[in-house]
Image (cartoon, rainbow, N blue to C red):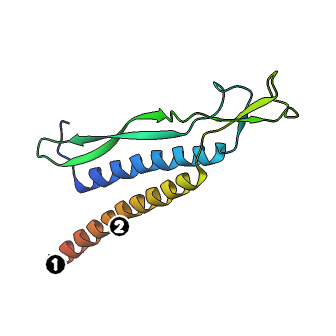
Amino acid sequence: MAAPLSLFDISGRAMAAQLVRLNTTASNLANAGAVAGSESQAFRAMKPVFRTVMDEAGRATVTVDRIDQSTTKPVKRHDPTHPLADANGDVWEAAVDGAAELVEMLETSRQYQNNVQVLQTAKGLMIDTLRIGQ
């Protein structure tokens, strides 16, 4: 990184990363229970992978490095009446743990809110510092 990171850069980037995490979790929840006609077409949960970014002064923030797909296999279910069923009458249900995704969503929203609080506190301290000089 060329320029040193400010408190606002650090929190802003962390909030952006948490937003990506929240969006992937929402996508996972939206696709929970989705059915496909083959194992390869079945939805697999996504998880963002974060990477630490440092500046010259040793201050760190985070960025999204990539988004990985889960290696959990979809659940095979016999349902010959389903329109997507294969020749054997099987369908594959998305490999998404709804309870785990809800926990992930709660944790993500708390992390995001923590960064909002950091920014609000910094803003308040800056305003109070400016008032001292008046």
Between label 1 and label 2, give the one nearer the viewer. Answer: 2
Q: Residue at x 34, y 48 (%)?
A: 13
Q: Residue 96 appears at what percent x and percent y? A: 59, 44
Left/right of residue 34 with respect to residue 70 in the rendered view: right
| Rendered view: 13 above or below 115 | above
Please give the residue where the numbered disc 2 appears in the rendered image. Answer: 117
Left/right of residue 90 with respect to residue 106 in the rendered view: right
Q: Residue 72 appears at what percent x and percent y? A: 54, 36
Secondary structure beneath dot 1 equals: helix
Label pair 1/2, CB-CB below 8 angstroms: no
| Viewer-nearest residue: 79 or 50 | 79
Outermost residue, left side:
57
Amino acid type for the residue under numbered disc 1: Ile
Say whether disc 1 or disc 2 marks the residue closer to the N-terminus.
2
| Rendered view: 75 above or below 110 | above
For marks 1 and 2, give the CA distance.
23 Å
Please give the residue where the numbered disc 1 appears in the rendered image. Answer: 132
Q: Residue 112: name its quadrant.
A: bottom left
Q: Residue 103 appears at what percent x and percent y? A: 50, 58
Amino acid type for the residue under numbered disc 2: Gln
Outermost residue, right side:
81
Give the quarter of the figure containing the C terminus: bottom left
Q: Residue 107: name its quadrant.
A: bottom left
Q: Residue at x 34, y 50 (%)?
A: 14
Q: Residue at x 65, y 42 (%)?
A: 31
Q: Residue at x 46, y 45 (%)?
A: 20
Secondary structure beneath dot 2 equals: helix
